[in-house]
Amino acid sequence: MNNNSQYYTRTAQILHWLMAIIFIGAWIIGFYSGNFLSYDVDGSFKGQVITLHKNIATTIIFLVVIRIFWRYTHPAPELPNTMSKNMKTLAHFGHLALYFMLLALPITGCLFSWSAGHPAPVLYLFEIPRLVQDNPELLAIVKPLHIWISWAAGVLLVGHILAALKHHFIDKDHVLKSMTQQPK
Ligand code: HEM
């Protein structure tokens, strides 16, 4: 299904940029904690940073459900005809992979936290009900999974941003504007 308008709806735009900010923020905080802090040296500060990472990142679970519903009921604008069929297919699969990351990262993150015996808090307001108890076997799987997926998501995100900038500055088409502007 395609959309006759050249622009995403305002709701789709708000969801996109809100999730972009949360995702990038969560990524940087997770990366900082995972690679620059250790419990031996930084003690409770590391705990506070991981707690911040979780409280921000869990919101993605709720937002992505709304976003997928909105995407189904409000199809995206068509890609420009100047793009080859192969590039359109690549863009399509890139977007699917990004949606996969938006689901897989918070899910593996929550499983990581629960199986290590910790909660999955949301915005310091409430906790997502625990679906698994302390489980070292599961932890041994979901911990590396969360880290690998976060790296793959980082690469994909950089590709996504570079593609958007290429559309805007080199191809000079409407792709980036479709996510920032509304019809006059
Ligand atoms: C969009 C969502 C998320 C993103 C982008 C994300 C990203 C990351 C990144 C980049 C790391 C560091 C990986 C490394 O060590 O190199 C990380 C670690 C971690 N994440 Fe996430 N994450 C997300 C969701 C979650 C959620 C929902 C939870 C738990 C409720 C969680 C729990 C953790 C924990 C416990 C670590 C280990 C931190 C450490 O060892 O210091 N993450 N995450």
Image (spheres, rainbow, N blue to C red):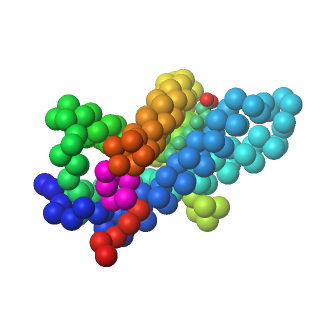
Say which of 120 and 70 sits in front: 70
Decide whether residue 130 is among the magenta residues. Answer: no
The quadrant of the image that shows the C terminus is bottom left
Q: Position of residue 21 (x, y in %)?
A: 54, 54
Decide whether residue 177 is among the magenta residues. Answer: yes
What residue lies at 38% left-to-right and 66% top-to-bottom?
A: 181
Judge from the rendering whether residue 61 lies leftward or rightward of residue 5; answer left or right. Answer: right
Say which of 138 and 20 sits in front: 20
Does the image show residue 125?
A: yes
- Mostly what secondary structure, the magenta segment? loop
Q: Position of residue 183 (x, y in %)?
A: 30, 72
Say which of 68 and 121 sits in front: 68
Judge from the rendering whether residue 5 lies leftward or rightward of residue 129; answer left or right. Answer: left
Q: Position of residue 164 (x, y in %)?
A: 40, 45
Q: Quadrant of ligand 1?
A: top right
Magenta region: 173-178
The quadrant of the image that shows the N terminus is bottom left
Judge from the rendering whether residue 38 lies leftward or rightward of residue 41; answer left or right. Answer: left
Most extreme residue toward the right, as rendered?
A: 41
What residue lies at 84% left-to-right and 36% top-to-bottom?
A: 42
Q: From this view, report whether residue 100 is shown above or below residue 11.
A: above
Most extreme residue toward the left, as rendered?
A: 1
Q: Position of residue 134 (x, y in %)?
A: 57, 36
Does the image show residue 89?
A: no
